[in-house]
Structure formats: C-alpha cells, structure tokens
Amino acid sequence: MDGGVVCLHFKERTTRDEGSEAGAGGFEQLLRSYQKGDAAAAAELVRAVSPLFVRFCLGHGDSAQDVEDVLQEIWLRVHKARHTFRPGAPAVPWLYAIARHARLDARRRRERFRSRELQVEVLPETPAPQPPVPAFQAQELLNGLPEAQREVLVMLKGCGMTIEEVARATSSTAGAVKQKAHRAYRRLRAGLKRTAAGWRP
C-alpha cells in the first residue's frame, strides 16, 4: 500500500525475501545491543524502525499529530519492555505487538476524550447539503473494514510483514490471519465495484 493505493492482488508471504531478512536480522542485533545498554544501538533502532511504525499507524487512518504522539508512546513501551525480548526470537513481531497495543490504547484514550468534549458542546445546526465527494479514496475503503481485518491488511501490505509475523504480532494463527486478509480483500473489491457503479449508502 503506497500513496493511498490499495493493492488487491493478495499474495501470501510466509517468508521474507533476502533483503528484508537482512533488515530483520539487523533489528534483532540492535535489540540485543540495546538490552546491554548500548546507546548507539538504541538510537539506530529508533532511526530504522520509526518509519515502519509511522506507516503502520497512518495505514489505520490516524492523523499525523496522533501518529507523533503514538510513536513516542511506542518507544517508551519498547524501552520498558526491552528486557523481555528473547535472543534468537524474531524482532519484527515483537516490535509490532508493542506498537499495536500502544496504538489501540491511544485510540481508546482519544475516543474517551472526544466523547467528553461532545457532551459539553452545543449541538450545531444541521449543515446545508454538500456536494458529493468526486472520488472515493482508498483510505475510506480501509476505514470501512472491521478493525481486525484492517489491522491485518495494513501489516501485510502497508508494513510488508509476513503471514507468520502478523500472526505472532496479533497473538493469532497463520490460518486466522489468512482468513481475515481474504475477507478484507473481498470487502474491498465489493466496495470498489459499488463505487464504480455510482452506488452510495
């Protein structure tokens, strides 16, 4: 998924290619050095992984401001949990599991805060009808997916994770990840067909 374009050709990836594997191995080495108190390794890990976390959050439709706040929370949690990373374990699922929980907790906090704001605000007058949006954006299609399906799709396509990595990060199974991905693609294809036909809810 790049620049808001949704790829609808689902190719199940159970292993990484050579270049990606080298990057994942580098993350594991950096994490091990980080555990030993290597400040340079910690800084390099933040530099290398932060863009992946940003892409993960943006893929869920989070705003740039929200992503900035969540990114700080993710790294705070990584720092606190760094001792739980087991040498020899894959780094990517471990990192994304922390990012996933941090993002979900941040979203719940935002929803509670915005709900309290709405309770004290005066209800606005009904706005005049607006012209329809000329083009249905890919992000709107993604936002219409159930949370579990959107999460799997963002990890697979937006973050380039494998089936097994997504399963580990979400405490699920490879079969369940595949099922959610296939259901997500069916819903996206159906949405695209309705849009092409001029259908609106």
Image: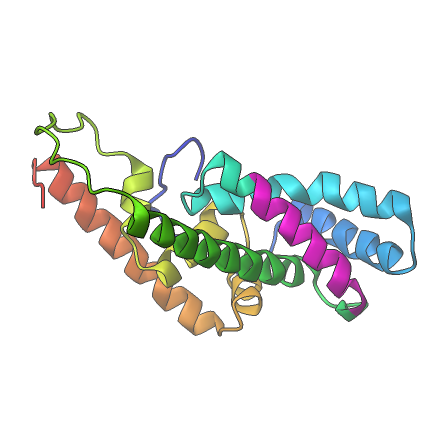
Residue 108, position as x, y percentages in the image = 44, 58
Residue 147, position as x, y percentages in the image = 36, 59
In the rendered image, residue 156 lying in the magenta stretch gets the answer no
The residue at the point 20 percent across, 42 percent down is 123
Q: Looking at the image, can residue 164 be seen? A: yes
Bounds of the magenta segment: 68-83
Residue 152, position as x, y percentages in the image = 43, 58
The residue at the point 57 percent across, 68 percent down is 168
Q: Height in image: 179 above or below 91?
A: below
Q: Looking at the image, can residue 11 be seen? A: no
The residue at the point 76 percent across, 70 percent down is 84
Residue 30, position as x, y percentages in the image = 82, 51
Q: Nearer the viewer, residue 49 or 174?
A: 49
Q: Nearer the viewer, residue 28 or 151?
A: 151
Q: How many marks?
A: 0
Q: What secondary structure predominates along the stretch shown in magenta?
A: helix
The residue at the point 29 percent across, 44 percent down is 121
| Colouring scheme applied when the structure was drawn | rainbow
Q: Is residue 40 left or right of residue 149?
A: right
Tell me which corner region of the image, top left, top right, bottom left or bottom right, holds residue 130. Answer: top left
In the rendered image, residue 75 lying in the magenta stretch gets the answer yes
* Quadrant showing the N terminus: top left
Q: Nearer the viewer, residue 36 or 15?
A: 36
Q: Height in image: 126 above or below 174?
A: above
